[in-house]
């Protein structure tokens, strides 16, 4: 074990004091940044925001990481897990120069320091936690739980990268973080980088002690041993001791990481390593005011936010603040111009080695296009509309397989899923790659390997999402395949990522990243066998609340359309793409060329399906009824309804519209994909009835179209939260999305009542009774419903 | 350690075989339930659904629990965590007689057995996992992750109850489950019951091995020691050995639980105990087909669903199925009538000791009304509208405090939160109770105690939700207080609970339970200090997708309305109530009596605020403009806009409508709270402009009102996903919900253009610029905006 020179440790302490000073300055100072004159009330911000508690610990870690980066030329990015630890990352990226390079206005001098202080948590300024605005950050510190998953996502396929991930002991109590420790079972030491978790045990969250700080150290040790880590403890509050202890610990863990990588990369060791981690135990609000108004602050939850909460109204607090600021001896640290003195500045790494300038944390800068095969080559032959396909995602499989294969040397594409990739019928991937897995593999296992493009062997939607986000944010590509109902598990994570995309798009220095692609392949209509708990199409509703510049929703009606959509999504940048597709054998409608054209438009009239042309109508622009469909099952039921209508009411002029790109329905003023009103009217007419069969909750269609001229005539059928274990067709009947209900609705909306219509309705009601009786006897749908065919 | 007589263990094995037989029968048999004749293809269901893999293990556990229940008169409920383990719980509740008592048609004879088999995963039948239909269940086995949280919720304040919670090794990988192990830090051995987790390590999830099965046993042991448990391992595949091992282990853990409770209850030991748990390691699909078509099935992931997947198309599978069924020797277990023989039947407990008949699992049966103080006594004095309040939730605090206190002996009310109860200003609770906490308590800690009504010291929304659900489902009352943005973390859990409520309401034998009450107290408009990541009002959108019979949404505009709403919610049954309220000082509008009246109606015209009456208009029913508001901040901004308009355009007839109960907006055909069209028209008119200021995303109001006559004139202002760190008022400006934009919108909607109007708009634009300049200089809102007052 190496010892560190006292001189070096003293300089590091000085650097740490500089960072702490800048942190307190950000929280408190409105003016007088270098305390050139006695502190006055007008120097203090009138509204105090920010979180001191976590900050000194994060500053401490950052300074120590700088030492090993500089010494060893390490490639490290920093993730600030604890919420609102913004002052620390900002102070450090400012001290190392990254901040001023990106924001020249925040210069490394007194004027810049004043702006640095003022902008923090101030209108027109920056947030109180690491955010897209923060150099070197890929992780927003608002909602807690995802730091460690992001850290792993960042190092997959980045063998030279280490993510130093600070995890707050509050965050460690969340579910996503509690299971993220198991990510070490997936990290390949040869082809991936390393994650160095630094659990920052400062004892308190907002208002309570933390669990991990109050269990015995033995229990804590067992817990991390059980998670498969080797914990190194650094505990104390005396700075000199702590610097020595942390430096020693960090040397050990870096050596350990190198040793693991060396053994795996050069000695061929394939036994899963026990990766090192650090448990840093330091007082909350370390170096801040110890006691205020007779109440203990440092080392309690009262240090969580601002220890001196109201200098304006509390006599003495102003003096305490000045004393606190002066305790860092800024005059020893900054020169007359307000610039960090060279002896300290040289402690930081330079160029891209600075954690605030590491290009991995601005992943778009490293993004390489995927090599994509021509999706047209993967199409199903559709000799006539309605032929039975093998299952849409099953057709997509070979395309994804070849995407994986074409980029296997580039190593920048992965498929994520919670043990559902096979269930979602994407098994073709396993012809060229495996599920990455570092635990023992048994003879009966399939498609598990140390290295693989598929991250699918952890039953946690949170991990899939977190890993994928980390992977995308560091400049790679990916796809998350999931059951539709259970994607709600990551609703909150989606929110944060969508917000990140929105804000980062507005920052000129942030490069755009690849889109986050969801493939929801086991959807509400085909969860007939799993029942009500698996039936929920509401993720779309959740998604469309986010900024239109960021979200895209696609519902391809068949396999060829799914191919076209997926090709588009994999090429796109800085969006969230939601793709909903079926996996069961179902009718196919379009040839691959027609599909490409249809998906390019996003919405269109299927003239071959309707009866406008068939009737040779002179005025083909005014159908009697418009039948719109969006989603694979709604498309099938709509076309089945049309086939009934064409047979039974042959004079009826029916227009069939299929929607692939849901956002086409919104006005172009609301969404960049939206149709103009004129385009919308040309499709949907201004006054004819529209029977709209939709994949999701009907209200969403009303929400998207309420400003359209013909909205009052739109009658939407969709999921009405009715379901159970039943047959596939019965699911549509329960929600009145089936062909019979759609047909009856058409009859009801016609401006005249006809004997033919009434007879037809009576027939259909009969059919529905017959269906019920049949399935309750046989447990299956009637053959004519299973195998739908287009009428001759 | 006690040994068990071989005769008893043999009988238990026979009982287990009976349960396994009934499980296979449910999955496969259409007819011939007792195999009285050779099995034919027509005896087999044509569509095979269900999950065999987990089932024999759960049957094994159930049989062993029966033994200790019967021996010791224990009060145990059973939670089946592994997904789709329905056949096990159904088989066992049938064998013990609970099933037939609830569903007499499924009788304990051959005819009943046939129906039992047929109904399983069959149209018109029952789901494949434990569900509301399953006797003895409080936990749906569809979405994984929540079993252990539910188990803890069930035993809080139930000192005599033990929840035996089977956790699948797949489920154990989810985030919520991974952190739920820490619940043991909150369980008080004196006043709460015990949770016995039984981790069922059968090695595989859907298609992959599980992590916990592939790490070393030492790591696994460390992990649970680290989580604070004492694990007992039962591992093997030879039934006789396993029965003996399980019986011994179960004796030990029951003795350990009794010892812990004894020590805590009678010996005054307050050191946190190390509760016991069982790790049961048995083959997946135990006792099922070992090899099919040369491929290993038992003990692999291929046993997950149906091991013999298609007897109709695979020669030999029918024979294998018959062989498998016969391996259980049903003729030794059931008599000629198809009834379990008495020597086996007597192994099960009787009456309410049967896990399928335990009243705690039908919690509504045990539900006692809360003792509620008169909320009218807690009102703020509102001498005139617009006086500054102290913060709405701060006013609610004393009411909740007294609810907690009045029911402190009943022990049936708890408040849950992720360390936010103080932040949400409900600290008054701590005048009468504490946060329950079993870890060491330090001198500087506040409001922590071994016993307390507040469950707030774990930073996990998942645990709050899971605990509360378990608490409610066993017949108690509670409230979940949470930041609005982060309640999305439990979107998926809400879905499952809402689905449970919907289905259970349709079962006559299930008693209604107390509502799940959310108080979202730190809402989107007052996250100005925390920034964009904390700003999301979309939970309402998510909630309203669920059945109208189950969901209620309230947005009280002030403290007195909040009191009235909360009183109502705490009295209600079988709903999910979402209440959104502010915590910061804000204007108050209604006296407590007016508030009670207003909230009773749920929506109403605030004549005192508008100018219809003031103008003494003869035709007061036709205002020039309707200004509607829903939510505290929108109400403030609307009334501020009205005050501008009344001053500047004194002849304008303005009607102010305030909405507390959001679902009033939906047609009465859609929601039981909905207004009729006539009522709606009387409020909103049929053709005058409506400027609607809404708390959430504007689209939600359109979605609720698109069928209303006057919908085309509704102009909704709400959250447009614009935010950052700024001031409270600026948040409204960024989203154009502020008084100035609302006022300008009114001017724009008037049927005439006036010079006064144009002048006013110019003034307001000026105001907005002034506001921006002011906050960017001062970091605060202008005083006149902070302290709004009603014009004289």
Image (cartoon, coloured by chain):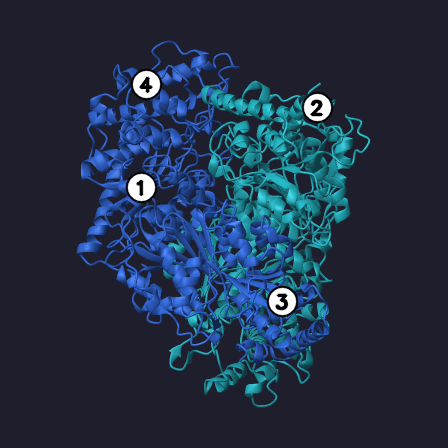
Chain colours: A cyan, B blue
Q: What numbered label is drawn on residue B742?
A: 3
Quick check: marks 4 and 3 in contact, CB under 8 Å? no
Of residues A405 and B492, which is closer to you in this image?
A: B492
Residue on which the image places disc 1: B361
Image: B770 above or below B161: below
Residue on which the image places disc 4: B111
Q: Position of residue A317 (x, y in %)?
A: 47, 84
Residue on which the image places disc 2: A650
Q: Earlier in the sequence, mark 4 or mark 1?
A: 4
Image: B253 above or below B386: above
Disc 1 crowd, CA 10 A, few/some/many (<14, 14-19, 20+): many
Q: Position of residue A456 (x, y in %)?
A: 56, 39
Chain of the residue that carries numbered disc 2 in the rendered image: A
Labels 3 and 2 positioned on one and the same chain: no
Q: Position of residue B228 (x, y in %)?
A: 35, 52
* Outermost right residue: A618
Labels 3 and 1 positioned on one and the same chain: yes
Disc 4 crowd, CA 10 A, few/some/many (<14, 14-19, 20+): some
Labels 4 and 3 positioned on one and the same chain: yes
Q: Earlier in the sequence, mark 3 or mark 1?
A: 1
From the image, state whether disc 4 or disc 1 is nearer to you: 4
From the image, state whether disc 4 or disc 3 is nearer to you: 3
Determine the secondary structure under disc 3: helix
């Amino acid at each position: 074990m190496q010892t560190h020179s006292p001189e070096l440790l003293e300089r590091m302490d000085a650097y740490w004091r500089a960072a702490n000073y800048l942190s307190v300055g950000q929280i408190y100072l409105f003016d007088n940044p270098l305390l050139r004159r006695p502190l006055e009330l007008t120097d203090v911000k009138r509204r105090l925001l920010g979180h001191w508690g976590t900050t000194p610990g994060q500053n401490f870690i950052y300074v120590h990481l700088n030492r090993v980066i500089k010494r060893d030329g390490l490639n490290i990015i920093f993730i600030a897990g604890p919420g609102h630890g913004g002052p620390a990352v900002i102070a450090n990226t400012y001290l190392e120069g990254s901040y001023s390079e990106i924001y020249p206005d925040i210069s490394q001098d007194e004027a810049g320091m004043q702006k640095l202080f003022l902008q923090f948590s101030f209108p027109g300024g920056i947030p109180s936690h690491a955010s897209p605005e923060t150099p070197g950050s890929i992780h927003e510190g608002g909602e807690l739980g995802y730091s460690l998953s992001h850290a792993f996502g960042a190092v997959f396929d980045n063998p030279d990268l280490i993510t130093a991930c600070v995890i707050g002991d509050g965050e460690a109590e969340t579910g996503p973080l509690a299971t993220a420790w198991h990510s070490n079972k997936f990290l390949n030491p040869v082809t991936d980088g390393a994650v160095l978790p630094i659990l920052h045990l400062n004892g308190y969250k907002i208002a309570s002690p933390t669990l991990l700080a109050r269990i015995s150290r033995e229990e804590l040790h067992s817990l991390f041993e059980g998670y498969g880590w080797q914990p190194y403890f650094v505990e104390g509050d005396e700075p000199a001791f702590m610097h020595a202890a942390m430096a020693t610990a960090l040397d050990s863990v870096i050596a350990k990481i190198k040793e693991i990588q060396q053994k795996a990369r050069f000695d061929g060791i394939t036994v899963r390593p026990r990766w090192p981690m650090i448990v840093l135990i330091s007082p909350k609000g370390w170096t801040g005011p110890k006691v205020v108004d007779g109440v203990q602050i440092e080392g309690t939850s009262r240090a969580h936010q601002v220890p001196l909460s109201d200098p304006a109204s509390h006599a003495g607090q102003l003096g305490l603040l000045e004393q606190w600021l002066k305790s860092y001896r800024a005059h020893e640290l900054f020169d007359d111009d307000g610039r960090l003195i060279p002896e300290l500045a040289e402690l930081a790494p330079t160029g891209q080695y600075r954690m605030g300038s590491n290009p991995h944390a601005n992943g778009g800068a490293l993004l390489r296009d995927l090599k994509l095969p021509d999706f047209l080559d993967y199409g199903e032959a559709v000799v006539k509309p309605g032929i039975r396909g093998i299952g849409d995602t099953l057709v997509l499989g070979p395309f994804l397989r070849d995407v994986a294969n074409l980029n296997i040397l580039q190593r920048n594409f992965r498929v994520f899923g919670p043990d559902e990739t096979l269930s979602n019928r994407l098994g073709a991937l396993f012809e060229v790659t495996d599920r990455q897995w570092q635990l023992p593999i048994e003879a009966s296992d399939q498609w598990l390997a140390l290295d693989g493009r598929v991250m699918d062997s952890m039953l946690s939607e949170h991990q899939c999402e977190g890993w994928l986000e980390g992977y995308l944010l560091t400049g790679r590509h990916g796809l998350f395949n999931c059951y539709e109902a259970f994607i709600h598990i990551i609703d909150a994570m989606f929110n944060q990522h969508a917000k990140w995309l929105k804000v980062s798009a507005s920052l000129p220095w942030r490069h755009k990243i690849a889109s986050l692609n969801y493939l929801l392949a086991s959807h509400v209509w085909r969860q007939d066998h799993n029942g009500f708990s698996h039936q929920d199409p509401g993720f779309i509703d959740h998604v469309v609340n986010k900024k239109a510049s960021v979200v895209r929703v696609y519902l391809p009606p068949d396999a060829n359309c799914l191919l076209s959509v997926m090709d588009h999504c994999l090429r796109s940048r800085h969006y969230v793409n939601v793709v909903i597709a079926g996996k069961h054998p179902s009718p196919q409608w379009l040839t691959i060329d027609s599909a490409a054209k249809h998906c390019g438009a996003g919405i269109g009239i299927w003239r071959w399906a309707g009866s406008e042309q068939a009737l040779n109508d002179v005025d083909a622009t005014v159908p009697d009824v418009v039948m719109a469909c969006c989603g694979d099952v709604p498309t099938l039921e709509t076309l089945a309804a049309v086939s009934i209508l064409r047979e039974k009411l042959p004079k009826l002029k029916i227009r069939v519209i299929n929607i692939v790109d849901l956002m086409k329905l919104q006005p172009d003023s609301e969404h960049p994909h939206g149709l103009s009103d004129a385009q919308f009217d040309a499709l949907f007419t201004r006054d004819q009835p529209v029977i709209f069969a939709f994949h999701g909750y009907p209200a969403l269609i009303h929400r998207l179209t309420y400003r359209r001229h013909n909205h009052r005539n739109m009658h939407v059928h969709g999921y009405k939260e009715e379901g159970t274990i039943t047959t596939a067709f019965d699911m549509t009947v329960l929600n009145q999305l089936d062909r019979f209900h759609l047909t009856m609705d058409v009859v009801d909306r016609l401006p005249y009542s006809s004997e033919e219509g009434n007879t037809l309705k009576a027939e259909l009601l009969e059919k529905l009774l017959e269906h019920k009786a049949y399935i309750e006897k046989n447990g299956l749908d009637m053959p004519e419903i299973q195998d739908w065919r287009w009428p001759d």
